[in-house]
Amino acid sequence: MNKTASTQRTQVAVAVIIREDGAFLLASRPPGKPYAGYWEFPGGKVEPGETVHNALVRELHEELGIEVTHATPWITRYFDYPHAQVTLSFFRVDGWRGEPHAREGQVLNWQAPDHIDVQPVLPANHPVFAALALPAVYGITQAGSDPARFLSKLDNAMAGGLKLIQVREKSMPSATLETFAREVLEHAQPHQARVLINADVALAQRIGAHGVQLNAAQLADIGSRPDLPLVAASCHNAVELDRAEALGCDFALLSPVLPTPSHPGAPVLGWNNFATLCSGRTLPIYALGGLDHTGLECAREHGAHGIALLRGAW
């Protein structure tokens, strides 16, 4: 991957077309094209004078016969094939008119994020499947001095669909924290929810958590990616996002987006700065700070993968 020399790279608009049931559309490349028979997301080259969004709309009409009514910017992939260096700008497409149908000799197939059963897939797309498997909402624990009461709230949230949880209890004694983290993990297993531990790689590894959430200080100092299935980073600026990408993090939190009750008067990013920081990023980004569930669509309009919630999650 090489993000430099962008003028030499072919700009490509790519669509992750998502049905209400969460399935997304893949298409096989037709005969006569490089990597013929390989599966990919629909899309195509950005023509001179086009915006990436306009190219997306045009390509999906040409390839699939649909009219895009709603698409939001998502992640970017920079990939070097033997025949081309490409910048792949992915959009989440969740609104369209018409039924997708093959207009250019390709084969179409709807896939579930947790069960990709078509092969071979274009190499650039493998990390995209992992990103698609991340849920829209990331809940951050707020147990305080009453872990038992919080576990009841956690059960209710997971019953309502919460699938990604960060154990973050800065005031909890270490022994209590480990017991609490183990309980969260135990409660999460029946719901197939994934649990990350805030800022403690050793604890995450010891209890078999799914991952760790690195804070900004750890992100700056750590030499290599921790040996865990999921590694996330807490970021506040472009330098920290650069570091998260270089470390190979699976996703990042970017904050604070809006004012929060816990930090009244503190500087915030605002949505315009948030969108600028998200643009061109290779990893999914969750918006954090001053949000509740109603903020998901706005976050996605500004390039977020989803939202991270503290009070709002419970």
Image (cartoon, grey):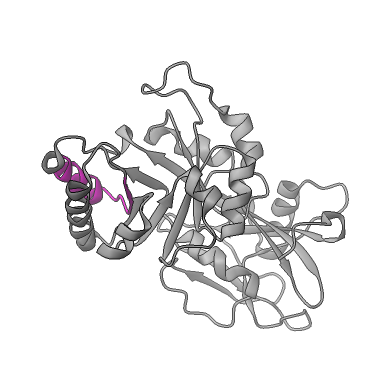
Residue 213 vertical placement versus 308 (above, below): below
Depth check: 160 or 142 in front?
142
Depth check: 240 or 120 in front?
240
Image quarter where the N terminus lies is bottom right
Q: Is residue 97 visible?
A: no
Q: Position of residue 205 (x, y in %)?
A: 32, 64
Q: Which residue ends up furthest to the top in the rendered image?
A: 265
Residue at the spot 71% in from the left edge and 47% down from the top edge: 53
Is 87 left, or right, of 168 in this rendering?
Answer: right
Magenta highlight on residue 153: yes
Residue at the spot 82% in from the left edge and 61% down from the top edge: 9
**What range of the chain is rendered magenta?**
150-167
Is 117 left, or right, of 102 in this rendering?
Answer: left
Q: Position of residue 81 (x, y in %)?
A: 75, 74
What is the quadrant of residue 127 in the picture? Answer: bottom right
Depth check: 302 or 2 in front?
2
Depth check: 26 or 85 in front?
85
What is the quadrant of residue 33 in the picture? Answer: bottom right
Magenta highlight on residue 215: no
Q: Is residue 287 visible?
A: yes
Q: Position of residue 74 (x, y in %)?
A: 59, 50
Residue at the spot 63% in from the left edge and 56% down from the top edge: 66
Q: Which residue ends up furthest to the left in the rendered image?
A: 148
